[in-house]
Image (tube, rainbow, N blue to C red):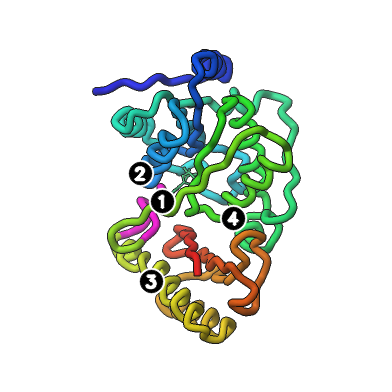
Amino acid sequence: MTQIAVFETVAAMRAKVAAWHEAGEKVALVPTMGALHQGHIALVKEAQRHARRVITSIFVNPTQFAPHEDFKKYPRTFDQDCAMLAEAQADAVFFPQVEEMYPPGFATRILLLGPAAVGLDDRFRPTHFEGVATVCCKLFTQSQADCAVFGEKDYQQLKVVTRMAADLDLGIEIVPLATFREPDGLAMSSRNRYLSAEHRALAPLLHKVMQELAARLRNRDDLFKAVTEAQGEIISAGFELDYLEARHAESLAPVTSLADGPIRLLVAARIGGTRLIDNIAV
Ligand code: AMP
């Protein structure tokens, strides 16, 4: 099996990155929580287009999970992840333990406004983005990477992290990448493995409804009516819908017509205890 370098400490990662920078090589970071799938590998491939060296971080970040969420049962498949990253010719894995990221006494959080406070995922996961931003800020400064690649799959997260990196002058470029999907349209996610066969068969409906809604909006259908009907379709299929909304693609502010665009459709829905999110451009 091909091996890949694994750094468990910030110091070890920094020493390697310093050597790469010394040699004039750019470094890209791909932050993940592991349980890797082809969507993550697509991020690594994109990172390789932007930098000679690619580090993938694997860290199930406790501060972005609420107490009732799936932190403990989140899938951990480290050996398989490393094999996939070696195969993709990534250069290194940063795999810190919780104590390396949050030593005793750790007491800092990043306060977020703008795209983090628009009533989408932030409404249903009120402390989620401050956890994401805190860990991403740490990963960026720890790694000293030149750029970091994030998936559009987590669209609000992408906007939050991009805003934070610019606002805090973190000196890192945030590179977005389109959502990687299963052949039936379901957005790949580490959480898809929680789905029963029955719910897995139902899950692609989310993307299908979003595609149909986007087509209706492009054809100038009434936005409120079209969105309400799409919401109804998802609920009738058996999902518990957190939200399905049309928002401004950059600010994530509510929109009332196509003229308020560019528009992004965003959805979060639960089925059998698994929460799925997706989004699509109009
Ligand atoms: P996660 O490990 O799920 O927290 O995600 C790590 C990174 O992978 C984030 O930037 C996600 O947006 C991205 N990602 C997750 N699933 C996909 C996908 N299906 N397509 C593209 N990027 C993805």
Query: What is the distance, in whole Å, between disc 2 and disc 3 at their CAs?
Result: 22 Å
Q: Which residues fall within the magenta stretch?
A: 186-196
- Mark 2 falls on what kind of element? loop
Q: Earlier in the sequence, mark 2 or mark 4?
A: 2
- Mark 1 falls on what kind of element? loop
Q: Earlier in the sequence, mark 2 or mark 1?
A: 2
Residue 113 lies, in percent from the top left, at 74, 52
Label 1 beta carbon within 8 A of ligand 1? yes
Foreground of the two, 91 or 103: 91
Residue type, numbered disc 2: His
Label 2 beta carbon within 8 A of ligand 1? yes
Residue type, numbered disc 4: Gln
Residue 97 lies, in percent from the top left, at 53, 25
Q: Earlier in the sequence, mark 3 or mark 1?
A: 1
| Left/right of residue 197 with respect to residue 142 in the rendered view | left
- The residue carrying pointer 2 sits among few (fewer than 14), some (14 to 19) or many (20 or more) residues within 10 Å by Cα, namely some
Residue under the image location 68 percent in, 54 percent down:
116
Foreground of the two, 122 or 69: 122
Residue under the image location 36 percent in, 33 percent down:
81
Q: Earlier in the sequence, mark 4 or mark 3?
A: 4
What residue is shown with label 1? 189
Query: What is the distance, in whole Å, between disc 4 and disc 1 at their CAs?
Result: 16 Å
- The residue carrying pointer 4 sits among few (fewer than 14), some (14 to 19) or many (20 or more) residues within 10 Å by Cα, namely many
Residue type, numbered disc 1: Ser
Identify whether 246 is placed above or below 179: below
Q: Quadrant of residue 166?
A: top right
Label 4 beta carbon within 8 A of ligand 1? no
Q: Which mark is residue 208?
A: 3
| Residue, far front | 24
Q: Which mark is residue 37?
A: 2
